[in-house]
Amino acid sequence: MIPQLRNDIDRDLQRPAGRWWRLAGLFGLGWFVLFAVGAIILQGEPPAYDASVAEVRQFFTDNGTQFLVGDYLAGLAFLLLFLPFVVGLRSLLGAAEGGPQIASRLVLVGGLATVLVGDTATVFQDTLALGAGNPELQDATIRAFLYANAPAIAAIGLPAALFTLAASLVIWTTAVLWRWLAVVGVLAGVLLAVGAAFPVAGDPTGPLWTIRFLSFIGLLVFVVSVSIAMLLRAEPPASLSTPPTHA
């Protein structure tokens, strides 16, 4: 099955109007792989914002370079792979949605905002990775960066929730992809929206933090599942496969 799928993709991409949504699905899977390497394997789990300054200094002294490399790879994943995936998904959903395509346009807005907010949010921990081992950086400054990082990272959940919820609406109403994906997307979207409030609780390991953690797992599952569905979809939506009629 895999060799046949690869041959189909190669053949489709050679056509002027090939099945481009399959290429977008490949971008989505590529994003997951590169993001996992950068953000999960290389960066690991940095100390929480209530950790001791000594622990924070030690973590970033030992892992600073590896952390920055991981952030660089994660940034590449979002810019070079996630954004093309979002654009391809928006096009596929828009073709199926028809009309003003409001929900599918919100998919693009949510995906782009997720990249922008996420790229901005990493500046605080990247600064610590560069300077936490420097004795000239005061403890109070390190603590301030830790506090600033918590709401910045949490804020990623809001545009990501818009992305998943808008995509789920189109998937459910049009069945352009497997309908059960909409259920996964709604669940991930709700968790993302609720988890974004975890700094309010003032507990870096409390229930809201757990919801936030689960929400990002849900986002990964949604993107990977949608990518696979796009990769396996053989035919375009009706509005793409049906030529326009002229009076």
Image (spheres, rainbow, N blue to C red):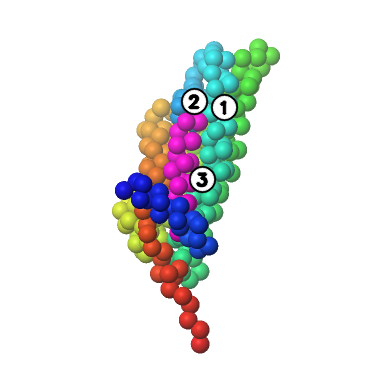
Which residue appears at 34% of the width and 62% of the height? 175
Magenta residues span: 19-38
Q: Nearer the viewer, residue 46 or 16?
A: 16
Circle 1 residue = 69
Q: Is residue 19 above or below residue 115?
A: below
Q: Quadrant of residue 41?
A: top left
Tag 3: amino acid: Phe
Which residue appears at 66% of the width and 17% of the height? 137
Magenta segment includes 22: yes
Q: Where does the image place residue 149, in percent across and percent down from the top left?
A: 55, 31
Magenta segment includes 118: no
Tag 2: amino acid: Leu
Please state the total of marks drawn on the protein image: 3
Going from N to C along the chain, the mark reached first, 3 or 1, is: 1
Tag 1: amino acid: Val
Going from N to C along the chain, the mark reached first, 1 or 2, is: 2
Q: CA distance from mark 1 to mark 2?
A: 7 Å
Picture disc at residue 42: 2
Q: Where does the image place residue 206, in percent across and percent down from the top left?
A: 39, 29
Q: Where does the image place residue 89, in percent across and percent down from the top left?
A: 47, 55
Q: Nearer the viewer, residue 34 or 168?
A: 34
Circle 3 residue = 82
Q: Are marks 1 and 2 in contact (CB under 8 Å)?
A: yes
Say whether residue 107 is visible: no
Crowdedness near tag 3: few (<14), some (14–19) or many (≥20) residues, C-alpha within 10 Å: many
